[in-house]
Image (tube, helix red, strand yellow):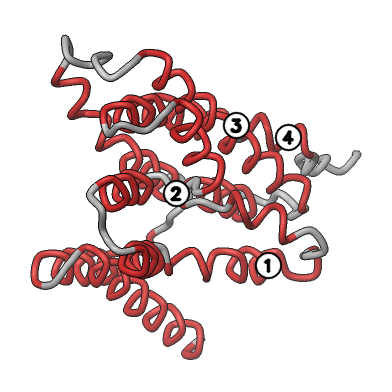
Amino acid sequence: MSETQAPSSSFRAGLVMSIPVVLGYFPIAVAFGVAATRAGLSPAEAVMFSVVIFAGAAQFLALTLVTSGAPLVLTAVTLIVMNLRHVIYGPVLLEKAGRHAGARHAWAWAWCLTDEVFATTLGALMRGRRFSERLVGGIGLGAYLAWIAGTAVGVLAGESAFEAWPVLDAALGFMLPSLFLALLLSFLDKTQLLTVAAAALATVLGTFLVSPSVGILAGMILGAAIGALKRASQ
């Protein structure tokens, strides 16, 4: 009897796997394009915002800071703190990949390693798919192009695009965290519940007591600490 063929880790497979992320990113990017137009950015400036920054929810914050005249240093520091979690995404994937890991083109695919791209790739690895830079590149490029295209559509739609649907405008703000949570829950098992619960609690407490950025960092640190202790005890 022949062995079961391993799932493909090609660039094309990555593009196919990016479809759920694309479906989540596109409408939110449209909302960003509309928001950028409302804030007074030109069409070219709004699209380049997404091309250069590509930061999801943080991009809305960056838009607010930039258009409100906040100092450049304050804007940069705020965004760096808010996105510090991205520093660990690449090493986590490479560690999970083990001997199959390759980082020759990490400078390219790491650019597209957002929360959702990371969750999609990690889920694929945990289901037995072999790591490849082409796979991550396909997932990341699909997400990146969807974000840029959505921004362009939002710019073309204009600043009054959502005036007739205020509920839809408000609901779009929940799509990114909902998508990320759904991707994570798709591959979590019972052995990870304690770590997830503790990290979630630390995030909520830090957010309400200090700020969202502190909450995210607290959740990352506590979750990583519990995970390390569990691994050391095995």
- The residue under label 1 is 94
- Seen at 29% across and 50% down, the residue is 61
- The residue under label 4 is 13
SS at circle 1: helix
The type of residue carrying mark 4 is Ala
- Seen at 35% across and 79% down, the residue is 221
For residue 192, side relative to residue 160 (left or right): right
Q: In this rendered view, identify the residue nearer to me: 31 or 228.
A: 31
Q: Position of residue 94 (x, y in %)?
A: 68, 67
Callouts 2 and 1 close, C-beta under 8 Å? no
Between circles 2 and 4, the one closer to the viewer is 2
Q: Position of residue 141 (x, y in %)?
A: 65, 38
The type of residue carrying mark 3 is Leu
**Residue 14 placement: quadrant:** top right
The type of residue carrying mark 2 is Ala
- The residue under label 3 is 145
- The residue under label 2 is 55
| Mark 1 or mark 4, earlier in chain | 4
Q: Is residue 95 above or below residue 39?
A: below
Observer able to see residue 191: no
| Mark 1 or mark 3, earlier in chain | 1
